[in-house]
């Protein structure tokens, strides 16, 4: 009996020991690579290999059904997400998914569904990591240039008025090419319309900061150098743009307070460029409308008779971040208005759209705002896709440059993208965020060591202007030098695959849209193409062929005269 009791005691101890082992089923990892994940859940289908094989099969079938579209691109839309690095795209897609109470990682932003992707190299000719001026010159004019320079080639010295005045240095944009071919042109941005990226559409300046005359040195003004705002309103191609929307009202108005808008301008020359824009359109005898807020813009959009020209300046400075805006149109709404305006031209249009405040949020290490601005940008792309026909409209989505934000650590699937890594702490025992910056405003260290962000109420309360940790302390986070993604949909989308210089992008768009001197066979109208082919002529109307044809016609006419 005693022997049996001993066995029972041993059995109970064994069972309790097993239970203790089960209670500690997730041992503390000895090394980072030994991290044990702890997702809230894993979709049941994903646990089976058949799910992934089926998904791959569906993607493959879809790819095999794709056909090459070599139609003439009647319309072209270029979207630039300023500072939208690949890390930003990944974090934003996860953020958007988690807003919908999903895991997030498997979410897809609408432009990521485009059938063709490529990679663009972004350096300036004098800088390893670029700014938005040299990149705007690259992706809008097709010419790489120096850091801080807009619309001029590399034969310039930054800040030199002589370089700016020499027209041999000027590099016209794809917007100007489109106008020369009878298309309508517009630009939409969430920054000041005189900021570096949109300025690439129309300005030629050796200094990106010369947005108003107050920014230009007196010596340069005396030599005849014009500021960026003045160029937009008074010079071609800017004054020909049918749609101009964004912020930056102060660059156009005198240095006095306007009681209607309660804003103060910057201009020292006393010129009100908005009045000048109005006078120019009156002289041209064209209908036009100037709007300053969302309510006024929506009135224009919903009217039965749209104006021929539209100028919208919605803030004195940059437009407000989407999450902080009041009576301000979203980027999606501005794109919808612009497409409605420009679509009236039977020859087509070119539209430039910039989600510019992604970049500004990154510069302040405001990761939350950067991701939200990227999601808003994706909504604008989706709207453009819905409003256009992919058979005749080429949409190209890209970025001008990257940033230093990374998505790092080994967080579990579905972990809050804006939170701390859930599976481990640093070797110092302090938590760390999934998103962080290589440099920027918020240092990672104080006199006691690495900062614990979880002790910050601003972090815990998800305040919009919380600066995420950075390694190297700077007054402003910098750009990144890695390649940026290019997404394309529409006629000649297949041209945009592989890796190339950023300056190739407008040339490929121009080829698809028949804006250059190297037209493809579908640039010729169908009825003319049918005539030439039926008579045995070459359908590819390059300039040498046309010159030869003209020579033959002249020779024949002389014979019969």
Image (cartoon, helix red, strand yellow):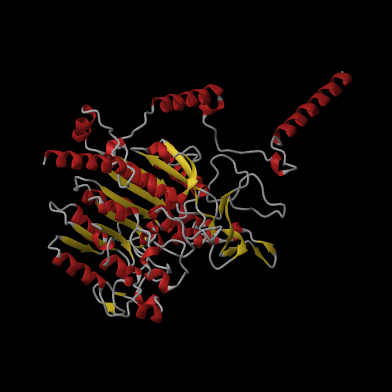
Height in image: 160 above or below 137?
below
Q: Residue 382, how many percent across, how many down?
A: 34, 43
At 25% across and 57% down in the image, what residue appears? 243
Res 524 quadrant in image: top left
Q: Nearer the viewer, residue 12 or 486?
A: 486
Q: Residue 283, how many percent across, how many down?
A: 14, 67
Say whether residue 63 is left or right of residue 343: right
Asked if residue 463 can be seen in this view, the reply is no
Q: Residue 527, how many percent across, how many down?
A: 18, 33
Say whether residue 422 is left or right of residue 246: right
Say whether residue 40 is left or right of residue 241: right
As drawn, the residue found furthest toward the right would be: 3
Q: Quadrant of the C terminus?
A: top left
Height in image: 349 above or below 444?
above
At 36% across and 68% down in the image, what residue appears? 317
Asked if residue 138 can be seen in this view, the reply is yes
């Amino acid at each position: 009996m005693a022997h049996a009791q001993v066995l029972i005691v041993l059995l109970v101890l064994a069972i309790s020991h097993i239970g203790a082992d089960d209670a500690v089923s997730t041992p503390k990892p000895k090394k980072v690579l030994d991290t044990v994940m702890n997702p809230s859940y894993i979709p049941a289908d994903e646990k089976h290999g058949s799910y992934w094989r089926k998904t791959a099969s569906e993607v493959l079938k879809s790819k095999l059904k794709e056909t090459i579209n070599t139609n003439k691109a009647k319309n072209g839309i270029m979207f630039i997400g300023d500072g939208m690095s690949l890390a930003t795209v990944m974090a934003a897609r996860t953020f958007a998914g988690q807003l919908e109470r999903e895991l997030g990682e498997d979410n897809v932003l609408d432009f990521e569904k485009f059938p063709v992707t490529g990679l663009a190299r972004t350096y300036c000719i004098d800088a390893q990591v670029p700014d938005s001026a040299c990149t705007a010159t690259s992706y809008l004019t097709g010419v790489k240039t120096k850091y801080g320079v807009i619309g001029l080639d590399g034969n310039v010295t930054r800040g030199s008025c002589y370089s700016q005045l020499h027209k041999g240095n000027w590099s016209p944009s794809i917007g100007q090419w489109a106008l020369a071919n009878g298309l309508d042109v517009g630009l939409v941005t969430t920054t000041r319309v005189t900021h570096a990226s949109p300025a690439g559409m129309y300005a030629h300046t050796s200094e990106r900061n010369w947005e108003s005359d107050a920014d230009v040195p007196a010596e340069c003004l005396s030599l005849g150098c014009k500021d960026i705002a003045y160029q937009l309103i008074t010079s071609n191609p800017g004054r020909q743009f049918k749609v101009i929307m964004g912020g930056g009202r102060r660059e156009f108005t005198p240095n006095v307070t306007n009681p209607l808008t309660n804003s103060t301008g910057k201009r020292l020359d006393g010129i009100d460029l908005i009045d000048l824009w109005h006078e120019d359109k009156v002289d041209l005898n064209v209908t036009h409308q100037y709007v300053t807020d969302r309510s006024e813009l929506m009135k224009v959009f919903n009217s039965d008779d749209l104006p021929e020209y539209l100028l919208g300046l919605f803030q004195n400075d940059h437009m407000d971040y989407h999450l902080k805006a009041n009576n301000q149109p979203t980027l999606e709404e501005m794109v919808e208005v612009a497409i409605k305006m420009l679509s009236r031209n039977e020859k087509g249009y070119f539209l430039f759209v910039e989600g510019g405040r992604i970049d500004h949020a990154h510069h302040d290490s405001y990761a939350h705002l950067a991701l939200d601005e990227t999601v808003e940008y994706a909504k604008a792309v989706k709207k453009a896709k819905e409003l256009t026909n992919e058979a005749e409209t080429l949409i190209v989505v890209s970025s001008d440059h990257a940033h230093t934000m990374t998505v790092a650590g080994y967080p579990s699937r579905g972990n809050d993208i804006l939170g701390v890594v859930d599976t481990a702490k640093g070797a110092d025992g302090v938590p760390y965020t999934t998103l962080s910056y290589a440099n920027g405003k918020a240092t990672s260290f104080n006199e006691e060591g690495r900062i614990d962000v979880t002790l910050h109420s601003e972090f815990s309360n998800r305040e919009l202007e919380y600066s995420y940790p950075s390694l190297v302390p700077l007054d402003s986070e910098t750009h990144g030098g890695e390649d940026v993604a290019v997404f394309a949909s529409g006629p000649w989308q297949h041209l945009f695959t592989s890796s190339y210089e950023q300056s190739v992008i407008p040339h490929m768009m121009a080829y698809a849209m028949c804006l250059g001197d190297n037209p493809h066979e579908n640039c010729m109208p169908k009825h003319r193409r049918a005539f030439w082919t039926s008579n045995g002529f070459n359908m590819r109307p390059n300039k040498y062929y046309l010159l030869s044809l003209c020579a033959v016609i002249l020779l024949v006419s002389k014979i019969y005269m």
